[in-house]
Image: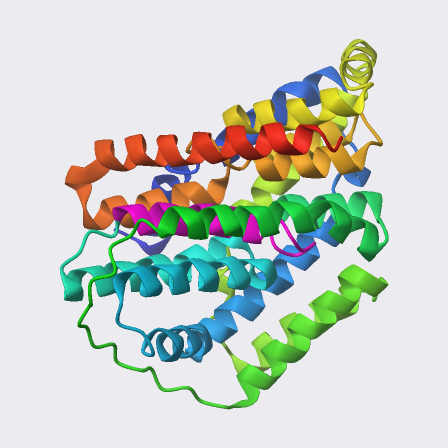
Amino acid sequence: MNLNKFLLINLFSKLKSESLFLIATFFAIITSFIILPKFSYIDTHVLMILFNLMVVVELYKKENVLDFIAINFLKKYNSQRIICAALIILVFFFSMFLTNDVALITFIPLTIIIGKKSNFSTLKIVILETIAANLGSALTPMGSPQNIYLYSKFAPAPIEFFKITFGISTIGLVILLLVNFFTPKEELIFELETPIFKKNINVFVSTAIFISVLLSIFFKLPIIYITIFNIGYLTYKKENIFQKIDWILLATFISFFIFVGNLSNIELIRSWMFNLLSESTQVYFTGIILSQFISNVPAAILISEFTTKWQPLLLGVNIGGLGTLIASLASLISYKLYISEFPEEKRKFFILFSILNFSILILMGSLFAFFI
């Protein structure tokens, strides 16, 4: 088998598992037959922010920065309840800055290792970590793809943004810690090998890039210059990072931008959607409900084209990340990581995930409806 054929088979195999990308691309193509798409539909600012954050994360992972911090923190505790609380808090705060996906990819495997070494079921804590990632990432503009997009599109003052998101994250964390209070206090005995943390040029550069991305988000520092530097640095250092970037996620965003751009220029649909989303309450509940079926990132992109009411939309799609397994793409990451280790627990995972997620969704969804 030649290399090209091998690469094509690998690409096809990966695409089969990327249903959201395939669906988004299908609708982008279909609507492009109805109305001619424009390049201006694509929000390159959002794409470059996501790309740069992915590079930062991959460089941190390469130098064991995230694992080093997490393992040194967890080594201080041996009570099951406290360790589970520590994991929730770590995921919650890491997701604010490095996105919910990265927090789960970092901590779910670590949680499973601790569970295996200590002989306790990690099912409940993995699900709580998943909820923590979705609620923690809701706080900041760079915590999740939908926040990056909405912050870029509506450009609110930072204080106005945090007024909306602070309550979601704070109340969410309190609920999670209350649920964790019913975790047994029994002592866990385990040993984790602390990875070697090299304070080298990669750590310095990735931190500088991260700070630059924050400046770009909050103070409109041109992201194009950061991106050019990033690509130049990786090329010069010959770092094997480009192939680790989630290009499918970036391509999915492009497909959704084209689909939504096309849709928003079809007059009949445009008129109907503007009428549907004329009130803040309608925007809020549409964000929650639509997220359950297509996930909160595409829901945010779609609804944002037909309303200027960004506050209820921000609330709706972040709270809407709770609920079904596909309401947030980060939840699918947890599911895949856990089921790959415990395939016999698919049904148990789905049942407990649904109970906890829908319970918190109903509680928080009802509570924040009074603030619309």
| Left or right of residue 1: residue 49 | right
Residue beneath the point at 61% across and 55% down: 143
> In front: 155, or 136?
136
Residue 144 visible in this rendered orientation of the protein:
no
- Assess whether residue 203 is covered by the magenta stretch: no
Q: Residue at x 34, y 64 (%)?
A: 82
- Compared to 367, does 87 lie above or below? below
Residue 261 shown left or right of residue 327 in the figure? right
Residue 46 at x, y = what percent? 71, 51
Residue 142: say if magenta.
yes
Which residue lies at the image location 34% right of the left edge and 59% below the top edge? 84
Magenta highlight range: 123-143
Inspect this view and state whether residue 365 appears: yes
Residue 62, relative to residue 353: is it above or below?
below
Q: Going by the image, does 133 lie left or right of 226?
A: left
Q: Is residue 69 above or below residue 294?
A: below
Q: What residue is at 35 percent from the left and 73 percent from the top?
A: 74
The quarter holding residue 370 reads top right
Report the quarter where the C terminus lies: top right
Residue 237, x across and y down, in percent: 55, 82
Q: For this rendering, which residue is in front, 129 or 266? A: 129
Q: In this rendering, is residue 16 above or below 47? A: above
Instruction: Tell me where residue 34 appears, x and y as whole percent.
Output: 72, 15
Q: Magenta span: helix, strand or loop, mainly?
A: helix
| Residue 42 picture quarter | top right
